[in-house]
Amino acid sequence: MANTSVRRYFKHLSDAITTIFEGMSITCSHFVRKPYTIQYPDRTPVRIQDTLPPRYRGILAVDLEICTGCLACERACPIDCIVIDAPKDQKTRQMQLTRFDIDIAKCMYCGLCSEACPTGSIHHTTEFEGADYSLESLIRHYVATPVAAYKAKKGEETDPVVAPILERGLAYIADYAEPVDMKKYKAAQEADPAA
Ligand code: SF4
Ligand code: SF4
């Protein structure tokens, strides 16, 4: 009986010593291993934003040059993040954008506003760093001085400034309308993770 207890005692002792060494060997191996983690943001070889897929729903941006003032985005937002003022100018009878605010503190990045936009003016970017010191500063004001709302041309857009912006907007809409081919996407990511 006494022999069995002594044997069990030494067995436990040996198990304890073995497991301590096993654990310490794993811990110590990390001194010589290449780290899996990287320090953010100053130690990344490329900006994280540049490695995100194009459909990433980051902080919204607005291209006022192609905003028609239709208010579709404002109406589509389920939590009232967007406030637009677009009165008609009494002299010119043209719609003026006097206010276009987006509260990015409230925004849940659902994409409903950009889906409703007919020109791709309001769109998600790959930007996600929005931290600031106050809630007020998280309200993005896009109108500095009143601007005329965009009027779609019957034919092609010929204004050299507006045309490329509209092209970007329409490409954005078309891209979202297409279902993602995950096989192609994964293959492209594997070939070039920064693409
Ligand atoms: S992404 Fe969604 S929550 Fe954010 S402004 Fe657009 S509709 Fe509103
Ligand atoms: S951003 Fe788009 S949806 Fe919103 S008011 Fe302008 S054109 Fe209309």
Image (cartoon, rainbow, N blue to C red):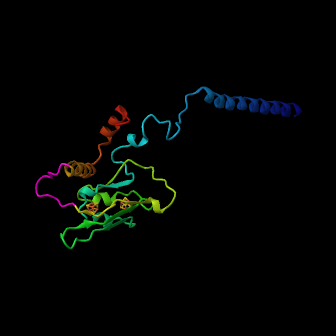
The percent coordinates of residue 55 (x first, y second) are 33, 48
Picture quarter containing residue 50? top left
Q: How many numbered callouts? A: 0
Rendered residue at 22%/71% (across/down): 89
Picture quarter containing residue 186? top left
Q: Is residue 135 above or below residue 50?
A: below
Q: Is residue 177 magenta?
A: no
**Quick one: which residue is furthest to the top in this view?**
32
Q: Is residue 49 above or below residue 1?
A: below
Q: Is residue 152 magenta?
A: yes
Q: Is residue 91 above or below residue 193?
A: below
Rendered residue at 33%/45% (across/down): 54
Q: Which residues are magenta?
A: 150-160
Quadrant hosting ligand 2: bottom left
Front one among 104 and 5: 104
Rendered residue at 64%/30% (across/down): 26
**Quick one: which residue is furthest to the right in this view?**
2
The percent coordinates of residue 112 (x first, y second) are 33, 60
Q: Quadrant of the N terminus?
A: top right
Picture quarter containing residue 194? top left
Magenta portion: prevailing SS class: loop
The percent coordinates of residue 91 (x first, y second) are 19, 72
